[in-house]
Image (cartoon, coloured by chain):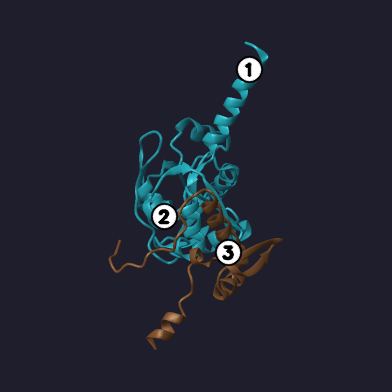
Chain colours: A cyan, B brown
Amino acid sequence: MRPATAILLLLFVAFAAVAAEDQAICAVCGPREGAGFEPVKAHATHKGKSYAFCSLKCKVEFLKNPDEFLVTDEGKPAPAFTLQTFDGKNVSLDDFKGQVVLLDFWGTFCIPCVNALPELQALHAKHAARGFAVLGVTVDDRAAMVKKATSRAKVTYPIVQATPKVWSAYKVNALPSLVLVGRDGKIVKRFGGEADRKAMLATIEQAIAR
Amino acid sequence: MILLALLAVLHSPEECLGKGFTVEHQGKTYELRYADCRDEFLTDPERYAQLYDALLEMQAAGQKVEPPRASLVPS
């Protein structure tokens, strides 16, 4: 292979990798329509958090009234769901009845999400005996990538595959999105990528103690 | 009373694009057609700067930038 051809091939592979990674749930279409991953055409920052959009039109719509898309469903019942693990096992929110559950909406293309896996595993292991569990809800359908990331972080808590219906019901408009569900099945608090870890840990501790 | 209520309605960001008033944010000047657009911009410059940047980008790309049409028919 000629050097020029090799360089072109490398550039193509690099471009394809970047292009493939630049996909996200649109902060407008995701919560509104349950739209899946779409190529990112625009970004916006609001109150320290970054949002991705499938079009400039969606970015404009979001910035006109961000509150419309930023839900405050704390205290409301967590939407019920039954999702499958990559091994085909069904996992329902009902399976965790009476427990405090931290739903971690994540994807392998989201670096902060992957970086948080060991910490979430540690949290799961530390409080499991007190009726606390982490449930990983991946919006990623690449089983091999998910297994690789979770194996590396030695994750033992269940990882299920999200469906558009579920991430729409939970109004997931950015990753990572963490939703803490209390023993009563109600949403206690949401945490995003910028979440203060200390505050999150304190909230989890309070929810477990209840 | 109705007239007063109508007068109090703010212009949409799409209607605000145009010359008349200027506002600066992080070294960039934004031209806005109406005073209420400028005042609204100043309430949350970070958000509105991004919003107007997006609208200008849409315009530059030849996309239609028009205010949403009012409709009594639910979508």
Identified at 39% across, 60% down, the residue is A185
Number of other residues with Cα within 10 Å of mark 1, as a class: few under 14, some 14 to 19, many 20 or more: few
Front residue (pair B71, A18):
B71
Amino acid bearing label 1: Ala
Q: Secondary structure at mark 2?
A: helix
Residue B51 placement (x, y as % from top left) = 55, 60
Cα–Cα gap, marks 1 and 2 = 43 Å
Q: At 52% across and 46% down in the image, what residue appears?
A: A41
Marks 1/2 same chain: yes
Asked if residue A130 can be seen in this view, the reply is: no
Q: Nearer the viewer, mark 1 or mark 2?
A: 1
Chain of the residue where label 3 is placed in the rendered structure = B
Residue at the extreme bottom: B1
Quickly name the residue at label 1: A6
Q: Residue at x 28, y 66 (%)?
A: B73
The answer to which image quadrant residue A183 occupies is bottom left
Which amino acid, by three-letter code, is at mark 3?
Answer: Tyr
Disc 3 target residue: B48
Q: Secondary structure at mark 1?
A: helix
**Crowd around label 3: few <14 · some 14–19 · many ≥20 (10 Å):** many
Q: What crowding class fits label 2: few (fewer than 14 Cα within 10 Å), some (14-19), or many (20 or more)?
A: many
